[in-house]
Image: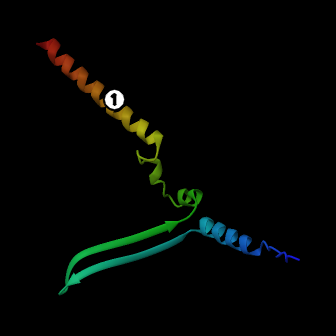
Amino acid sequence: MAQEQIVHSIQSTGLADILERVLDKGIVIAGDINIRIADVDLLTIKIRLLICSVDKAMEMGINWWQEDTYLSTKAREKELNEKQEALDKRLEQLEAKINLS
């Protein structure tokens, strides 16, 4: 006769609650690494890690991914449009110089 184990949802609910709280409230992990020889700073590394939901990040004013052309198609399109406008303006200037000659 095989024994069946009763599976409790407490563990999964606990993990889900923790994850929800972390994403809702946010958590910051910060640290600095300094490498020195004879009181001379050779290298300083500053580590800052923020874990939160996108909504919380935007509420805090953090939205760098929206302007990153690698991550955002809107930002990429905006950059391409700006480059196209600059090229069009430059072409007009060159055509104007040719017509004056």
**In the figure, is residue 48 to the left or right of 91?**
right
Q: Quadrant of the N terminus?
A: bottom right
Q: Position of residue 84 (x, y in %)?
A: 33, 29
Disc 1 is placed on an element classified as helix
Q: How is the image coloured?
A: rainbow
Q: Position of residue 85 (x, y in %)?
A: 33, 29
In this rendering, the answer to whether 8 lies above or below 54 is below
Other-residue count near label 1 (Cα within 10 Å), few / some / many at <14 / 14–19 / ≥20? few
Amino acid carrying label 1: it is: Gln
User: In the rendered image, which quarter is residue 17 located in?
Assistant: bottom right
Q: Residue at x 41, y 48 (%)?
A: 68
Q: Residue at x 65, y 72 (%)?
A: 18
Kindly identify which residue carries mark 1.
84
In this rendering, the answer to whether 45 lies above or below 82 is below
Q: Position of residue 70 (x, y in %)?
A: 41, 46
In this rendering, the answer to whether 69 lies above or below 33 is above
Residue 38 or residue 97, whichever sits in front:
38
Residue 33 or residue 67, whichever sits in front:
33
